[in-house]
Image: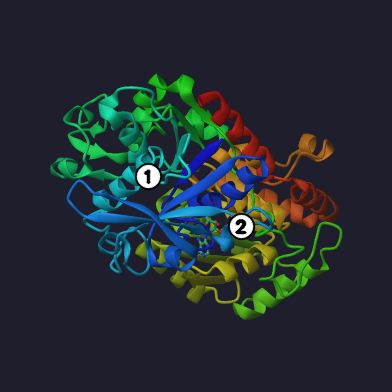
Amino acid sequence: MRILQVSAEIFPLLKTGGLADIAGALPAALLAQGCDARVLLPGFPAILAGLTDPVRVGSFGTPWGESVEVLFGALPACSKGDLIVYAYVLVAPGLYDRPGNPYEDANKHPYSDNHRRFATLGWGAAHLAHGLDTHWSAELVHCHDWHAALAPACLAVWNAGQGPRVPSIYTIHNLAYQGVFWPQNFGDLGLPGYVFSMQGMEYHGQISFMKAGLSYASHITTVSPTYAREIQTSEQGCGLDGLLRVRASQLSGILNAVDDSVWNPATDSHLAHRYDVRNLTGKVRNKTDMQATMGLTVDADAPLFTVVSRLTEQKGLPLVLSGLDEIISHGGQLLVLGNGDTQLEQAFTLQAKMHPLQVAFRKGYDEDFAHRVFAASDVTLVPSRFEPCGLTQMYGLKYGSLPLVRRVGGLADTVTDTDLETLDDHSATGFVFDDFEVGDYRRAIRRAFALYRRRSDWNRVRQCGMRIAFDWASAAQHYTNLYKSLI
Ligand code: ADP
């Protein structure tokens, strides 16, 4: 099966969040399943720099008259051994040759021409399904998030909507980010007028890339089974739950996995001390090194709670701030790595100043440091308001850090709360609370301390978590089964 994966980010070349981790791991996992998978990416500087032996396969014009060159080459950074990942990259310097974040400028403002930048990605996918590369044509287009969401609409209107249509899958990695633009931009998209309608991509008078993906994709997936159900409710549907209910029979959840070649404490080159489930002495050293680095009291026995996250309201960080005294008064420590919302950055900076021996904050985005945080951590906090899948709780599990999460989305699908029953049947892997309010969160923190005092139980739970595979082979198998059913 010839499958084109379309995304705006890909790990390790360009990453702002979990989307890149998935876009980076899935192609090689599909190749391992015997799928002829290739990727399509915008020509951001970091992506062009990672493309080797590029050849020009063709070009196409944008609706507003710009010419886009399409390069084809290998992405060694995303390949795994013999599984070479090949990519098409759209070269349009006027659209993509901007440093830093792919979506916004240095002042954190979205670029005003984002609709053009990502409409081009959608049209690029449609061209690659219709012969732009004379040697390879996609049989199915798999798009990720709103940046790629115009592709299903472009495929649907190709040949004026006549004749067989190349099927598409649209994967929602986060329904909250929708790619909504003013209606006067519709003319730039190169789509026929009827697409700007209730049945198409019109959303309260505006144009919505997310809605284009949801309306026109042959099938919709999201990144966990629970989130697939939740987004069909008004609470979590971000205004699109009605449409998602209409499409319920073509909507499914496929749980994300963890790339073991990147996230494995036994082989992780970011760590000074590697370890595995049979020997955790390296983990203790990583922890005391980290405490020293961050100016925390160096004490292997003080439970270290950590956060590695975009600092946004979604991630439940106000709960972490409100419940901080629960950690401090019990003799624990908190380490936060993250950036984003200025108020949250300021709040964590202040707490670190007030409690320098127990609270540390590293502002910024730092891949290397993130690995070291998971290796040092005892408890990974992910108390999200909503969470499509969440990767950090899975990284926590693999690194022997018990996740403390809210029972929502993919967090509910990946963490089993610790109680007498789950301790007894060896299914306990962390701490799960229900209500998005500080009382429930605090109780979960207290349960974490209670278990930490019972070291043999703690070790048992930790071992159960470290043994969970979250392997890409089974996730890729689910995707290939879906591709087969649609082609
Ligand atoms: P989301 O995609 O909503 O941000 P996920 O949990 O799915 O959340 O994925 C987040 C990814 O980004 C993980 O790989 C996590 O380690 C990484 N990450 C988040 N914040 C930072 C940061 N400040 N520095 C380094 N990595 C980070």
User: How many neighbours does mark 1 have within 10 angstroms: few (below 14), some (14-19), or many (20 or more)?
Assistant: some
Contact, CB < 8 Å: mark 1 with mark 2?
no
Element under disc 2: loop
Residue 72 picture location, percent across and down: 45, 56
At 53% across and 53% down in the image, what residue appears? 86
> Hey, which residue is sitting farthest left in the picture?
184
In the rendered structure, find residue 123 and report the number of the disc placed on it: none
Q: Is residue 145 left or right of residue 475?
A: left
Residue type at numbered disc 1: Leu
* The quarter of the displayed image where residue 132 is located: top left
Residue 472 picture location, percent across and down: 66, 45
Residue 213 picture location, percent across and down: 36, 35
* The quarter of the displayed image where residue 82 is located: bottom right
Element under disc 1: loop
Quadrant in which the N terminus appears: top right
At 40% across and 40% down in the image, what residue appears? 175
User: How many neighbours does mark 2 have within 10 angstroms: few (below 14), some (14-19), or many (20 or more)?
Assistant: some
Find disc 1 in the rendering and name its residue.
132
Find disc 2 in the rendering and name its residue.
79
